[in-house]
Amino acid sequence: MSVLDDDPTAPWPPRDHLIPDRAFGTRAIHAGQPPEPRTGAVMVPIYQTSTYVQPAVGEHLGYEYSRTGNPTRAALETCLASLEGATYGACFSSGSAATATLLHSLRPGDHVISSDDVYGGTYRQFNTVFAPMGIEFTFVNMTNVDEVRAAVRPGTTKLLWVETPTNPLLKCVDIAAMCDIARAASAMCVVDNTFATPYFQQPMALGATAVVHSTTKYVGGHSDVVGGAVVTSDEALANEIFRLQNGIGATPGPQDCFLQLRGLKTLHLRMQAHEANATALAEFLSEHAEVDKVLYPGLDSHPQHAVAAKQMSGFGGMVSFELKGDLARAERFVASCKVFSLAESLGGVESLIELPAAMTHASVPPDVRKAIGIADGLVRLSVGVEDLTDLRDDLAEAFEASR
Ligand code: P1T
């Protein structure tokens, strides 16, 4: 049967268009996005509407109001769920909104164990938004499984928040081990998969309850949109997330969903190119006399290289390194780059450079930053997909110019 024979009054796009038997690249382009049956449009239209006409009171065609549901958003939600090997997806106006909505499923007195070097905004949200509401947090070095096990409060720990690779230290946490600990404690194990993306890492297959994304990053892929997502296969959790998504209302507009759908279509291609450039630059930096330490999960020297190799099919596009010299030298270095732009965020086709201590992780108190190893001179690269020679030359010239 042609898609054009589909019942035009059925809700579109179908939420079950996960096409799980198709390979990743095919799902990135097609999951949740069968041709639109009324017109045959191959691309998902931008349904720029806040509301939907109802044939009669109490009857509708699958959509009533765009905070509750919008077809462009539904396509994105289904596509992301499919790529993560999940059944349900919910999209948000930012990664932080996705995190907050999920955290709202907890109750005062509930306890969360989190990676200690999560994104600075996540750390700030946990400590300044949810801790005052009575949610309790313990931040641990999640690469130490015993430390995580020891932090569990039986009956009270409800969530293990795993970010891997971490931002900005690129520590790799053993997802399967965290899921085992969570399961034994009857807690959720939620993985922020922003850095790896589903192309390189599949937390659901390793036992995660849910996966969270800042889709602002590699999913969007072009630094032109802010968004977030939660996916899960747990029906009860999905219903709770949909209830909170509608109740809190931090939902993305259809234009933003369209940009993310468009970005997703090349996710697999972009990730291969990001990784090839990142690997080459990590090797270049490792051999540089003015670099103290390079953090990249693909390097044999990375402390959790074995964990990364076990659970990732590629090591991503993020590289952090410590420059020799003081903070002023690091500031001169990042300001000297011409192809790398000095900016927060990551995951776009263009290369970005930043100093986490002064920028993305400035909201983490200095003593905490020091304790977890975010040095003032730590430089973070979001390696883009420009030509490698230009990226390598840019860094080489910045070493010279910043001396
Ligand atoms: O920026 P937003 O879309 O709200 O996403 C928050 C977020 C969540 N999780 C991870 C791992 C992240 O890196 C981020 C955002 N990070 C940056 C803006 C940054 O430059 O690191």
Image: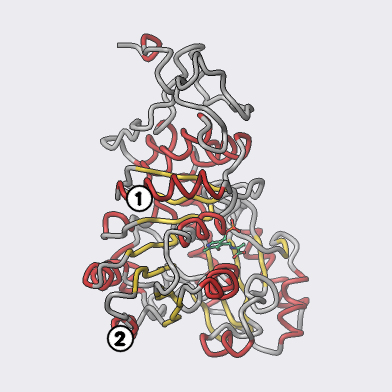
Q: In which quarter of the image is ligand 1?
A: bottom right
Q: Quadrant of residue 142?
A: bottom left
Q: Which mark is residue 232?
A: 1
| Residue 185: image location, x then y, percent | 25, 72
Callout 2 amino acid: Ala
Relative to 233, residue 261 above or below: above
Q: Is residue 327 left or right of residue 247?
A: right
Q: Nearer the viewer, residue 213 or 166?
A: 213
Report if the beta carbon of the residue with label 2 is closer than 8 angstroms to ligand 1.
no
As helix, strand or loop, the secondary structure at mark 2 comes to helix
Residue at the spot 57% in from the left edge and 77% down from the top edge? 321
Q: What label sits on residue 337 in the rendered view?
A: none
Q: In this view, does 286 lie above or below 384?
A: below
- Residue 202 in the image: x percent, y percent? 33, 55
| Residue in the picture at 34% in, 35% down | 18
**Residue 59 horizontal/vertical position (percent):** 45, 19
Residue type highlighted by circle 1: Thr
Q: Quadrant of the C terminus?
A: bottom right
